[in-house]
Amino acid sequence: MFLLATILIILFLLSATFLGFAIILARDVYSHPDGTAEMKKISDPIKEGAQGFFRTQYTTITMLALCLAAIILVSLSLRHAEAGAALSPSTYAMFATAAFLTGGFMSGLSGLVAMALSIRANVRVCAEAANRNYPGALMVTFRGGAFAAFLIVTLCLFGLVSLVAILTGLMHVPIVQVPLLLVGYGFGGSFVALFAQLGGGIYTKAADVGADIVGKIEANIPEDDPRNPAVIADLVGDNVGDCAGRGADLFESIAAEDIGSMILAATLARSCGLDKAHQTAFTMFPLCVHALGLFASALGVLAVRVKSVRPTTRTEKTPLIAPEAGPSGGGDTDGDDIGSEDPLHVMKRGYGVAAVVSLLGMWLLCYVMLHVPEAPRAWIYFALCGSLGIGTSWVFIVVTEFYTDYYYGPVLRIAQASETGGGTNVIAGLAVGMQSTAIPVLTLSTVLLAVYWLGRAAGLSDHLAAGIFGTAVATLGMLSVSAFILAMDTFGPIADNAGGIAEMSGQPAAARVITDRLDAVGNTTKALTKGYAVGSAATAAFLLFRAYMDEISALLPAGTKFKVVDISSPEVFVAGLLGAGLVFLFSSLAIRAVGTAAEQVVSEVRRQFREIPGILAGTAAPEYGRCVALVSRAALREMVAPGLLALLTPIVVGVVFRGVGAVSGRPLLGVQAAAGTLMVGTVTAIVTALFMNNAGGAWDNAKKYVELGHYGGKGSDAHRAAVVGDTVGDPCKDTAGPSLHVLMKLLANVTLVFGPLFLGKVARA
């Protein structure tokens, strides 16, 4: 019934189709005017700075990846041969190394394509805004992000399908043994994504913080003012951090989710004794959902159309539209008569289309691929699991909006606290960030238990494996609209850059009204997608944890399984404690890196203001290149330490406790200790990332609320206090927080790849 070759051909054809769709989106963006000479005078240095940093950053990452690839090749070649293994240890080591390099290359390519169009779309958005073409500006902004999203998600699918085809077609590996051989691909994606997110996050926030401290607080000049020497570095940072870093992040999230789900699906199919056709269907189901998500997201993108309505903008009166109000909370300003609906409303309509299509497609795929004679109603239970996953993604987005949008109480409390100074602003923001973790944690806990019990009740013979597979299907549902979510995320930095270009090139007020409107919504979409990213990372990390246990079970003697991690064991407890400590030390290094680099930016900007007095008067040009070079060097230098810490900690824990186990006669101690580090580290990272992302987003929008004219508006004491809070939140929400998304899956991928080395010899099959 299910022929592997047929499924692979269909997936290859769909990959080609979605690549074609991405090209159509790019051509649409390029069809818009690329701006005046004044605009290009600003956009060209942004493009050159982003490309220069990217080249240098990825040269460093490539060198680190090649060193790690050599370690993987040597260490996995020393494995003992297992009975029934499809590949010899040496062949397995070579394939794992090749898969690692392929995943790393694809992840890096994802970051490149995410940035490549964004640095060309920004000036086109500015040009459309200058022409008072609000619908055109919105469509260029959104479709620039959609191009990156579709290319990234399609590259991930194409890479996995290609590896499956090689393993089954050329190396004749049985389909149920294929998923465990793909873990190197996910590891490579995680490795590159971590350094890309760290380096880009350090760059963007160091420039942003430095520019704000001297520009807004000390010199009292507007954001993106051309007199600020750090403003070009700030705009470059939007591309290398929010575009390139997030693109690599999403790539590895999807790869980790697909591989983890395939491992659990293959385990279930094998343990239930399904025939070969259904083993193929179950194992390939995650990749088919991946393709379904691309189709649903494509329809969502096509549904993003601007309708002509009364002029609207977002103010404190409404989260979406307020027809009477202008951008400062009062009446219309020059150029605001643009007669189109709110950008967030437009994108939410597209998201709704994508979610509904994904929901319907999930039920169809479950019926076609998960319908088995042994349990004829099992597909219904798994379809319900996928539906809950899709619903969970919506809950995470709504909760994040509540805690980070200035329409709602939490952000308004922070803004009000700004009246009494920066200290009370920071205290209020910390409280909001901590409170914001409760509902997502309760939601995630409830859904994981619900889908686990739905899977157990599906009627398949292996209830435990079926329950765990239920969590995998829920995760697949949660990530099924990831392409559309990434398009919304990349919308933010493109709009931000367009606003900077409009300000620095002296465009009329009407153009800035449009770019400000897009930028305000872009800040909201970036916050929403971070909430979604934490939820998807958490569920993907859980899948990889279960996949790790299945991998170790496959190495044990027949009839023995690795089912329990005893946290009452002192060694396992200590390993878990190390995992929790890793999260905080990693975050500390990332935040400190931003602070160190920002201090250098502040000193440089002050020096230029002091030594070139004509800058503030507008009679002399700032030395933008000095700040760009300074931030680039700092970001590349500072990203290495936290990255290596995250990579080496689980390996050291597993190897050390394997040695302890060898001495004490406990051959499973190494794998149990590594599991403890992975489990506690993941749980800690989930809550910490939620706190950092939401607190940072709330501080940011509290500042924007004050800038609308409340509590004295721009230049007031409340505004200066709000800028302090925003400065504290910047490295949390754009450096440490997003990097923790990657850390969760990197820990899991490291244990998956090196897990066999943590297992004592006595316990081997």
Image (tube, rainbow, N blue to C red):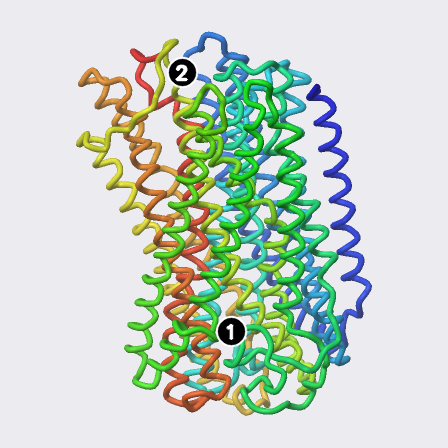
Instruction: Classify residue 185 by image quadrant.
Output: top right
Q: Are marks 2 and 1 in contact (CB under 8 Å)?
A: no
Identity of the residue drawn at 38% across and 56% down: 439
Of residue 218 and residue 13, the one placed in the foreground of this image is: 13
Determine the residue positioned at 76% across, 77% down: 133
Q: Earlier in the sequence, mark 2 or mark 1?
A: 1
Residue 192 horizontal/vertical position (percent): 51, 43
Image coords of residue 60 (percent x, y): 51, 46
| Any part of residue 233 in sight | no
Foreground: disc 2 or disc 1: 2
Tell me if 354 is positioned left or right of 690 in this view: right
Crowding at dot 1, Cα within 10 Å, few <14 / some 14-19 / many 20+, comes out as many
What residue type is disc 2 on?
Leu
- Residue farthest to the right, as pictured: 31
The residue tagged 1 is: 230
Image coordinates of residue 383 in percent, x first then y, are 57, 37
Cα distance between the residues tagged 2 and 1? 55 Å
Where is residue 94, by image quadrant?
top right
Task: Find numbered disc 1 in the image and state the secondary structure of the residue it sits on.
Answer: loop
Task: Residue 571: tell me if it is visible.
Answer: yes
Q: Nearer the viewer, residue 369 or 206?
A: 369
- Residue 455, compared with residue 212, is above or below; it is above
Marker disc for residue 555: 2
